[in-house]
Image (spheres, rainbow, N blue to C red):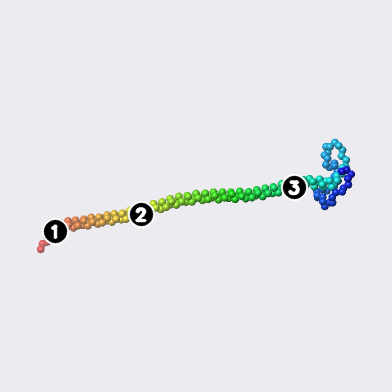
Amino acid sequence: MEGMKDEGPSSQDEPPHIEDAQLSAEDHISVESSVPVENVFIDKEAVYKLTEGLLSHYLPGLQNSKRTLQELTQNQLILLDTLDQEVTKFQECNALLDLNSLFTEAKVYHNKLVNIRKEMILIHERTTKLKKRALKLQQHKQKEALEREHQREKELERERQLIAKPAKRT
């Protein structure tokens, strides 16, 4: 490759990152090398072909890997959405369980309320009967008291009639 002239492809075919067709070997050999390096010229076309070969060898795999990663990312997003939906369903299910327990509790309290209402109606009926009975007893006592008063008056009247009356002188 030494002494070869640049006869590489036109600048349109070259990748934009190849700037200098002739690179000195000193730039690429480490400083630690003990062999003195002379100026070596590299063929532009060889660099281009090596670059193309390297790219053609690795680029399809890398592009395939990129597509696979994009698909995986998209699938992960879909899975995340699905998981969010499932979590929402579980939350709704828990809410329904809570709602069912609330309905059960409401039913228990409703039954208690119905029982209290029945007891209150029963107590109201008993108090009404007791009031009627008390009224009858009161009327009966008043009647007895009136009858005793009449009896007493009759006895007083009888006693008055039994008391001797002085005869009238005529």
Q: How crowded is mark 1: few (under 14 residues within 10 Å), some or many (20 or more)?
A: few
Q: Where is residue 24 in the image (x, y as percent from the top left)?
A: 86, 43
Q: Residue flagged by tag 1: what amino acid is it?
A: Lys
1 or 3: tag closer to the N-terminus: 3
Q: Is mark 1 on a helix, strand or loop?
A: loop
**For residue 155, what is the image quadrant?**
bottom left
Mark 2, residue position? 125
Q: Nearer the viewer, residue 86 or 2?
A: 2
3 or 2: tag closer to the N-terminus: 3
Q: How far apart are marks 3 and 2 (CA)?
A: 96 Å
> Split into 4 quadrants, where in the image is the C terminus?
bottom left
Mark 3, residue position? 60
Numbered disc in front, either 2 or 1: 2
Q: Position of residue 15 (x, y in %)?
A: 80, 49
Q: Position of residue 62 (x, y in %)?
A: 73, 46
Q: Residue flagged by tag 2: what amino acid is it?
A: Glu
Q: Is residue 132 left or right of residue 71?
A: left
Q: Is residue 20 visible?
A: no
Mark 1, residue position? 165
Q: Residue flagged by tag 3: what amino acid is it?
A: Pro
2 or 1: tag closer to the N-terminus: 2
State the residue at coordinates (83%, 40%).
Answer: 29
Q: Which of 100 and 136 is in front in this view?
A: 100
Q: What element carries label 2?
A: helix
- In this rendering, the count of numbered labels is 3
Q: What element carries label 3?
A: helix
- The residue sitting at the top extreme is 34
> Split into 4 quadrants, where in the image is the N terminus?
top right
Q: Distance between the residues labelled 1 and 3?
A: 155 Å
Q: In this view, does 26 lie to the left or right of 86?
A: right
Q: Is residue 90 left or right of residue 59?
A: left
